[in-house]
Amino acid sequence: MLATVLSGCRLHRPDDVLPSKKMEQFLYDYHLAQAIGQELSKEEKYQSKAYIDWAYQKHGISEDDFNRSLVWYTRNPKELARIYKHLSNRVDAEYKSVSRSLSQIEKKSFEIQSGDSVNLWYLASSAILNTSAYMNRLTYKINRDTTFHKGDTICLNLSGSFVSADTCVPYYSYISLSAYYGDSVSTSDTILRSSGRVGLSLVLDTVKDFSSISGSVNYLDSTDNRSSIMVLSEMELMRYHISF
């Protein structure tokens, strides 16, 4: 009878969800690829997604496999917190000694498409942040090219979910979207304190030429709780041409 009760209390993980050990191994390479992508120069930034693709290829999983598993682990925060407790310790110990040994990654060009409504987002559509110095920030940058028009509207959309086994952990994330001009900058930003959908937008100047669009998502936690996680999903950066 005791065995029956204990087995009934065990958390059932669906067969199409990655086991915790495989999830942890993948997340290590996923965050390593993400961190390396953040360090690329602006001329090499287009290669960021290739590093993420390398992590998928190495572990033999697809983005759908990961996203499906991430949904399950997000709904079971104790399991995800356990993974990140191990993962954060490993990242802190090993990251500084990791060399750029990802020679298997094929260099890919990023070209901005033309059109009245275009999604400019070039990174993975999902990401995970926590308070580790190497995992608490996601940045993006796109330089101006001929497909942009003066007066275009730029919109950043994403879903942010805070996950923690400790309900006392305060949630705090700063999210920004900026357009840089020769002598000025225009910024739209917000602070996210609870899980939800975020939308930021700004209109490019109708007179001045901008040089780049950039921004970041910063996950801040004064308690430095490594079991506290922010899951980003459905990320997109839309550009809309002005209508006359």
Image (cartoon, helix red, strand yellow):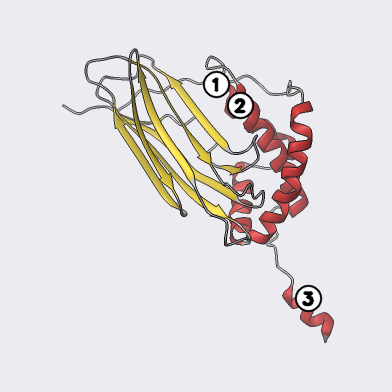
Viewer can see residue 178: yes
**Going 66% across and 21% down the picture, which residue do you hit?**
106
Q: Which mark is residue 37?
A: 2
Q: Callout 2: few (<14), some (14-19), or many (20+) C-alpha neighbours within 10 Å? A: many
In this view, the residue farthest toward the front is: 222
- Report which residue position mark 3 lands on: 7
Q: Which of disc 3 and disc 2 is earlier in sequence?
A: 3
What type is the residue that disc 2 sits on? Answer: Gly
Apparent side of residue 154 relative to residue 2 in the rendered image (left or right): left
Apparent side of residue 12 relative to residue 142 in the rendered image (left or right): right
- Report which residue position mark 1 lands on: 45
**Going 80% across and 81% down the picture, which residue do you hit?**
4
Between 91 and 40, the residue placed more toward the observer is 91
**SS assignment at label 1:** helix
**Going 30% across and 14% down the picture, which residue do you hit?**
209
Check contact, mark 2 vs mark 1: CB within 8 A.
yes
Residue 156's spot in the image, x, y percent? 39, 37
- Measure the alpha-carbon separation of dots 3 and 1: 49 Å
**SS assignment at label 3:** helix
Assign the C terminus to one quadrant of the image. Answer: top left
- Measure the alpha-carbon separation of dots 2 and 3: 43 Å
